Amino acid sequence: KQEVTQIPAALSVPEGENLVLNCSFTDSAIYNLQWFRQDPGKGLTSLLLIQSSQREQTSGRLNASLDKSSGRSTLYIAASQPGDSATYLCAVLTTDSWGKFQFGAGTQVVVTP
Amino acid sequence: KAGVTQTPRYLIKTRGQQVTLSCSPISGHRSVSWYQQTPGQGLQFLFEYFSETQRNKGNFPGRFSGRQFSNSRSEMNVSTLELGDSALYLCASSQHRDSGANVLTFGAGSRLTVL
């Protein structure tokens, strides 16, 4: 059974610092891993998708890496801004999941001006 | 291209009532999945439909049901509502079957409050 863990649960940084968010998973037989952002009371916004055969993906200030052998993914956000304040979730699609993505509990990020 | 549309956005019900939530996926997406989000349990998988067939169901009681229509629109129903059913219900759609290219796109959610 796939288990996804995100540490830390909460993180506060001053504006301008780089953010490092971690996601670990127990079953390496995955199709992909996806990072999302969620603002309070809202739906989830997709940030990056890393397919099983890829090692990293980049979009603007965001970079996500994937290491299947160790069951880890890291999301880097460069030069954080107050607008980056949100909860960040990772989700994994395993090969026997039949459409079910397994989510981590999320990391709540606060970027202070 | 329109996103995933969920209706209603907010609703208040009393215990024992039933509720139906609707989800219109992105055009061309054949997979629709539903998740329940609560502060204590996080995001929990309810079920997933692909081409009108339920492929997977999460660990929820039989009071939770769903269906998908031929145009890929989906509905979920909760009968005999309990206080613990208060949650944000999120619908997501994707274009592909299980594959590396399977990207989930979420709607804004339906906020259900049970009194």
Image (tube, rainbow, N blue to C red):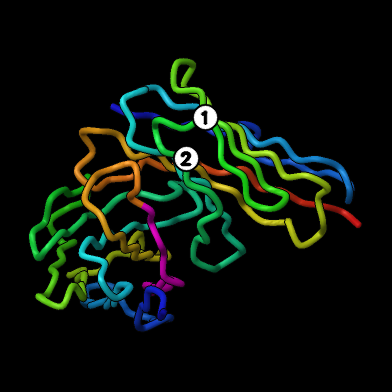
Start-end of magenta stretch: B103-115
Q: Chain of mark 2?
A: A
Where is residue B26 drawn, in percent x and y? 33, 73
Where is residue A70 drawn, in percent x and y? 49, 16
Tags 2 and 1 both on a single chain: yes
Q: Quadrant of the N terminus of chain B?
A: bottom left
Mark 2 touching mark 1, by CB under 8 A? yes
* Amino acid beneath label 2: Ile
What residue does disc 2 label?
Answer: A50
| Circle nearer the N terminus (2, 1) | 2
Q: Residue at x 91, y 57 (%)?
A: A113
Report the side of B100 relative to B63 (left or right): right
Q: Residue at x 33, y 31 (%)?
A: A30
* Amino acid beneath label 1: Arg
Where is residue A67 drawn, in percent x and y? 51, 23
Camera-side residue of A59 and B63: A59
Q: Residue at x 81, y 50 (%)?
A: A80
Residue B15 lies in what quarter of the image?
A: bottom left
What residue does disc 1 label?
Answer: A55
Q: Residue at x 66, y 47 (%)?
A: A108
Q: Chain of mark 1?
A: A
